[in-house]
């Protein structure tokens, strides 16, 4: 079972679907963020399994790049969440409609 | 033996993911995500990627999710500021049914690949020196661009998260 690439791809697709369902079904902004992270991880799994299949090291380098981009995204996303929570006192992603600094006096 | 390890790791990964989207409290979701990420690190080790195994544990579980847990605890979220999600389960079920054809399409396209043994390779593949050679020979420009992106994200996070001035 662990000898075929199809089982790894199946696992990655299951994880990607779970992440996608998390993005579309939850309103808690933290869980939306974590679902995005889960989707990035499943894409990493596809890259690494294809790299093992073709015995090439390049997909692992791409996976490392994805991890670095996820780290940058984490910093910006979490600071945005902190600003929004300070301003609106909620975690509901439907209410996070304004990114502007100017018209935030409500 | 490898099959059993793979099945156990896959079970932990999927159950952690399901727990992540089903828990109401974000702190439990983050802990479930740590379970998923550690299981995926084990699967990277099965796929002869020891460097990514370490990066996944140190960077993902150790830095990114810890930062997330720190922010969740820092905000001190009460139960009444959690959003109400009345259609959560029904949306998940309907979405899962709608995603099945998409997944089958992708699996069908991967099924055309000729099957090849995927046992764990020895020292001659995936070692850290191979990885570093490939990273600094073939991927030097993307590597530098990533470093600039990280610097921009650092500055952006500091600018966004500071306290507003009084002038409004």
Image (cartoon, coloured by chain):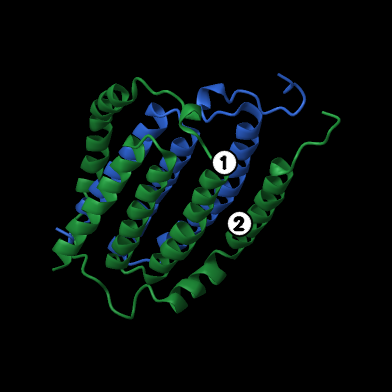
Residue B79: give x, y in percent of width and height: 45, 31
| Residue bearing mark 1 | B75
| Residue bearing mark 2 | B146
Q: Mark 1 lies on which chain?
A: B
**What shade does chain A have?**
blue
Left or right: B89 as drawn, with respect to B80: left
Q: Which chain carries label 2?
A: B
Does dot 1 land on a helix, a strand or a loop?
Answer: helix
Report how many numbered discs are placed on residues in the image: 2
Quadrant for residue A49, please give it.
bottom left
Label whose residue precedes the other's in the sequence (1 or 2): 1
Residue B15: give x, y in percent of width and height: 25, 46
Establish if B137 lies above or below B145: below
Q: Does residue A58 show up?
A: no
In this rendered view, identify the residue nearer to me: B166 or A20: B166
At 14% across and 62% down in the image, what residue appears? B4
**What shade does chain B have?**
green
């Amino acid at each position: 079972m662990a000898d075929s690439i199809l089982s790894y791809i199946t696992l990655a697709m299951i994880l990607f679907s779970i992440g996608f369902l998390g993005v579309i079904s939850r309103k808690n902004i933290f869980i939306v963020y974590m679902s995005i992270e889960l989707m990035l991880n499943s894409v990493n799994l596809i890259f690494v399994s294809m790299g093992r299949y073709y015995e090439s090291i390049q997909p692992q380098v791409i996976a490392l790049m994805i991890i670095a981009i996820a780290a940058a995204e984490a910093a910006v996303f979490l600071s945005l969440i902190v600003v929004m929570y300070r301003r609106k006192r909620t975690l509901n992603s439907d209410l996070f409609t304004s990114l502007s600094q100017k018209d935030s006096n409500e | 033996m490898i099959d059993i390890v793979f099945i156990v790791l896959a079970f932990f990964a999927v159950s952690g993911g399901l727990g992540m989207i089903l828990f109401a409290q974000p702190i439990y979701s983050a802990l479930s995500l740590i379970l998923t990420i550690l299981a995926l690190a084990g699967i990277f080790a099965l796929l002869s990627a020891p460097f990514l195994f370490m990066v996944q544990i140190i960077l993902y579980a150790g830095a990114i999710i810890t930062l997330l847990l720190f922010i969740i605890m820092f905000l001190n979220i009460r139960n009444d500021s959690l959003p109400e999600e009345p259609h959560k389960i029904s949306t998940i079920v309907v979405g899962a049914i709608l995603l099945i054809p998409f997944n089958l399409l992708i699996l069908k396209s991967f099924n055309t690949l000729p099957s090849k043994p995927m046992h764990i390779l020895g020292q001659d593949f995936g070692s850290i020196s191979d990885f570093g050679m490939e990273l600094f020979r073939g991927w030097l420009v993307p590597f530098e661009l990533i470093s600039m992106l990280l610097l921009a994200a650092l500055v952006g996070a500091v600018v966004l998260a500071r306290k507003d001035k009084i002038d409004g």
